[in-house]
Image (cartoon, helix red, strand yellow):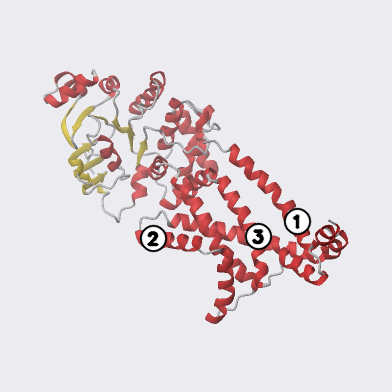
Amino acid sequence: MHALVDQFFNVAIMAQAMPIMLRGLGWTLVLCAVAVPCSFLAGVLIAVLGTVRFAPVRWLMVIYVDLLRSIPPLVLLILVAAALPFAGIRLSPFAAVLLALTLNASSFYGEIVRAGIESIGTGQWHAARSTGLSYAQSLVHVILPQALRNVLPDLASNTLEVIKLTALASVVSFQELLYSADMARSVTYNSSPITLAALIYLIFLWPLVRLIGRLEHGVKA
Amino acid sequence: MTTDQPILEVRGLQKQYGRHVALAGIDLKIAAGELVFVIGPSGSGKSTLLRCLNRLEEPDHGQILFEGQDMSGKKNDLNLLRQRVGMVFQAFNLYPHLTALGNVTLAVRKVLRKSREAADAIGLAALRQVGLVEKAGSYPNELSGGQQQRVGIARALALEPKVVLFDEPTSALDPELVRSVLEVMRDLKRAGMTMVVVSHEMKFAREAADRVIFMAEGAIVEQGPPEEIFSHAREPRTRAFLSQVGA
C-alpha cells in the first residue's frame, strides 16, 4: 500500500513536475483550440459535399469518411509523422499531429453533420429555394442551423473524443500534457506525474462530460 | 407587351417519375390578377404542376413563360423566377429556428439584398398585411397552424411577387383555423394579386375563383368559371369527382 501511494500519489514529485506539466497543458490546449475547429469545419465541408447533386463528389466523400474511420488514429498519426518526410514533406510535430487529428476527427464530424442535414425535411429546402435563396444560401441560413442544433449532443461528444485523442501526440514527441508527464516520470522514476496528468484531464473534461449528459437529455425528439 | 399577354404561361409541360406520368402535356395561360383554382383527385398532378411553375420541380419537357419570357432552360436565372412567383405550402414549412419576422425577412435580406432595417420594415408590412404584426417576435412553434400559414403567406408576399402559388394551403389546418387563411387570400385577390391555388376548399373556389381547372391523370380535363364547373360540368369525370367531394 505504501509503495502504491509512493509510486502514484507522491505529492512532492507532483509539485516538482508541476511547472513542466503546466507547459504541457498549455500545448494541449493550443492543440485543441486549433484541431477542434479545423476538424469541425472540415467535417461540415465533407457533409455538405456529400449532399451535392454531382455523384462523383458524393462518392469521394463516402470513400474519405469510410477510409479514415477505419484507420486507428494512432496508426494514422505514426504514418503521417513517419511517411511524409520520405515524400519530401517535413512537418513539425505540431503540424503532423494537427493533420492526423483533423483527418481522423473530420470524418466523424462529417458523419454527424450529414445525419443532421438528413434530419431536415425537404419542405425546408423547398421553402428556402421557393423564395429565391440559392443552394448555398439555403444551406447556410436554413438547413445547417437546424441540422447542427439537432446533432449538438453528438458534436459535443465527438469533441470530447478529439480532446482526449490529443494525448496521442506524445508518441511523436509533441510536448503536450501526457508527453510532459511521461518525461517527468522517466526523470523521477516515479509514476505520480501520470496520475497528475489524469487528474488534470479529469478536471478539464468532467464539466464537458456533464454538459454532454445534459444536452442528451435536454434535446427534444 | 400587350395587356392581354398572360403573366404566366406553360406550354406542353410534361413530367414523369420513373414510369408514372405526373404531367402529360399541360397548356395553361394565367392572366394578371386572375385567381385560378386547380382541383382534382390526389395523384392527378395538381401539386406537380404548381411546383413546376416556379421550377421547384424540373419539368421533362415544355416551356414556362413569365411575362412572355421563357423561363425554362438551364441558363435562366431560376432565383429571379422564384422571387417573382412566390409559393405557400401545405405544411407551412416555416423555418423553426427563426422568428416570424426572421422567416419573412430572410430572403428579403439575402435575395433582394436589403439592409436589416429595410428588410424589417418590409417584413413588418407583410406581417401587417396578414394581420400578424404583433406576432413578429414569435417562433413558429408558438403560433397556431392558421397563424403559421399566414406567416408563410407573408414570407411569399415580402418579395413582392407577381404571382403566388398556393399548394393546399388549408388542408393541414383545423376547420376553425381555415377561415383566417382564406380571409387573407380573399384580401390578396381584392388587391389584384395573381394566384394559382391547389385546394379542396370548394366553397371558397365557388365564391372567389375566376376560373376552375379540373385535372385528372396529369391532364387538364375541363376548365371554366366556377359556376360552370360546379353546376354544369360537361365531363363525367369532373361530375364524378365533384359529387365525391360533396361540392
Q: Can you name the residue that lies furthest to the front here?
A: A1
Q: Tell me if label 3 and label 1 are in contact, CB under 8 Å.
A: no
Tell me the quarter of the picture where residue A11 sits. Answer: bottom right
| C-alpha gap between disc 2 and disc 1 | 42 Å
Q: Which badge, 3 or 2, is on the more N-terminal residue? A: 3
- Residue A164 appears anywhere in the view: yes
Q: Position of residue B11 (x, y in %)?
A: 18, 44
B221 over A169 or under it: above or below = above
Within 10 Å of disc 2 (Cα), the crowding (few <14, some 14-19, many 20+) is few
Which mark is in front, 3 or 1? Answer: 1
| C-alpha gap between disc 3 and disc 2 | 30 Å
Q: Position of residue B123 (x, y in %)?
A: 49, 36
Query: Would you name the residue on which mark 1 appears?
Result: A200
Disc on res. A59: 2
Q: Which residue: 21% across, 30% down?
A: B213
Q: Nearer the viewer, residue A7 or A65?
A: A7
Which mark is in front, 2 or 1? Answer: 1
